Image (cartoon, rainbow, N blue to C red):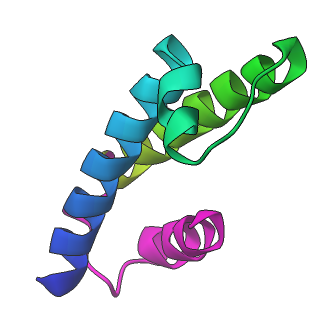
Amino acid sequence: MALKCWKIARAIVAVVFGIGFVLLPGTPAGIYGMDFNPAATFMARLYGAASIFEASVLWMARNISSHDVACHGIMPGAGASN
């Protein structure tokens, strides 16, 4: 149950930050004191797209048991991306 809650919480956080970085890359980055040039804007949008992808994978995997083979493939990737 704890793993399911973690997947849901991580998916929600990832999609919020992902949408923020894709649509308004300067706003979330301003929280961290970053200045943006065109290359940094592109990289922020790329990070946002990857974050949205991770959120979709975690959301679809929220009901997978921790003993399932698919979970053994998804969780190391999610952990590494964190």
- Segment colored magenta: 60-82
Magenta segment: does it hold 61? yes
In percent of width and height, residue 25 lies at 58, 22
Quadrant where the C terminus sits is bottom right
- What residue is shown at x 59% (from left), y 76% (from top)? 76
Q: Is 28 located above or below residue 24 in the figure? A: below
Residue 65 showing in the rendered view: yes
Indicate the quadrant where residue 58 lies: bottom left
- What residue is shown at x 65% (from left), y 72% (from top)? 80
Magenta segment: does it hold 47? no
- What residue is shown at x 36% (from left), y 37% (from top)? 15
In percent of width and height, residue 79 lies at 55, 74
Q: Residue 60 or 36: which is nearer the viewer?
A: 36
Indicate the quadrant where residue 4 lies: bottom left
In percent of width and height, residue 23 lies at 48, 12
Quadrant where the N terminus sits is bottom left
In percent of width and height, residue 43 lies at 78, 29
57 sits to left or right of 64: right
